[in-house]
Amino acid sequence: MTSKTEWVAVDWGTSNVRAWGIAADGSHTFSSQSERGMGKIGRADYPAVLAELIGDNAPAGTDTVICGMAGARQGWLEAPYLDTPADLTRLAGGAVRPEGSGFAARILPGVCQRTVGHEDVMRGEETQLLGLLALRPGFEGTAILPGTHSKWVEIRDGRIVRFSTAMTGELYEILSQHSVLRHSFASGAIDGPEIEDGIAEGMRAGLDSPALATSLVFRTRAAALLAGKGADWCSGYLSGLLVGVEIGGHRDWLDGPGVPLIGSARFGRLYGAALKLIGFSGEPVDASDATIAGLIAARAQT
């Protein structure tokens, strides 16, 4: 017998959106996804996209809890940021309710940091961090959420105390595709046999000398011209270097041997390898598991 959908959990990203039906016992009744993320649709499109995601899996009026970019200023309805220190156990209290969807939709807020000189924002990651607390009750310390815009977040007593964003993934894309470095990626496969050697060398350089990041980045091009390094080595070097620079620059945030890494398996391996080089252990947490756990915890708050 198929479980009945009691409510719907939605993660609305910039590029994609995912939905899960949740039964009373916490099991998943359905899952769906679409490439119609916030960056690809207008405000008036949200109700139709949500209806397509849910389809016939839940009746009209079903409770729907949404995190991510649907609450951005350019999204469906802006959900004002919670200021740090942000109490994750009260995240749902900042939710907003858009109209016209046919479902009882609530959009969770993001978190902002207004400290002069350290201004920062997040949307979606706060829900994953609430999920981390649900998966690992009592956690305190720094968690890393690697990705296009990596987040370093210090959590104390269930609160986001401070956080820092690093544009590591986006910088890799820009540098490899739109800078002079693109010539080093023009021929050959970027995932060839030399990629691991490049990652290791770049990672060590970034960890040792994060202040020299702009000079070390240019070595990607020079090594291709003078040392015959191929696209695979250059890809690995630039990726490892940027991760090493990020971690090297945040080394003082690390205060315990085990560091949660909330993200994909690939990023978990990459960041875990870099952390190991400086005496720490990365503890991978699947991003989808953290998101769903966070949405479940947020719904339970109201």
Image (cartoon, helix red, strand yellow):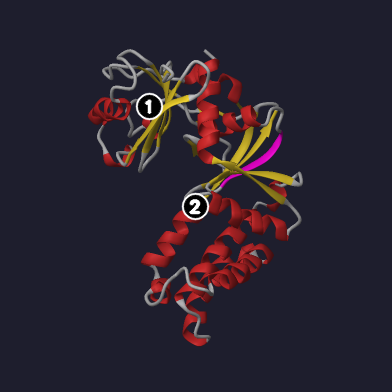
Q: How many marks?
A: 2
**1 or 2: tag closer to the N-terminus:** 1
Whether pointer 1 and pointer 2 mark residues with C-beta atoms closer than 8 Å, the reply is no
Q: Could you say which quadrant of the image residue 67 lies in?
A: top left
Q: Could you say which quadrant of the image residue 78 lies in?
A: top left
- Above or below residue 188? Residue 80 is above
Q: Secondary structure at mark 1?
A: loop
The residue where tag 1 is placed is 78
- Above or below residue 204? Residue 34 is above
Residue 285: give x, y in percent of width and height.
Answer: 60, 41
Observer-nearest residue: 119 or 20?
20
Name the kind of residue labelled 2 in the image.
Met
Q: Is residue 166 left or right of residue 184?
A: right
Q: Main secondary structure of the magenta part?
A: strand
The residue where tag 2 is placed is 167
Name the kind of residue labelled 1 in the image.
Glu
Residue at image point 68% right, 45% down: 259
Magenta highlight range? 140-145
Quadrant position of the N terminus in the picture: top left
Residue at image point 59% right, 51% down: 268
Residue 22: give x, y in percent of width and height.
Answer: 45, 22
Q: Is residue 97 left or right of residue 210?
A: left
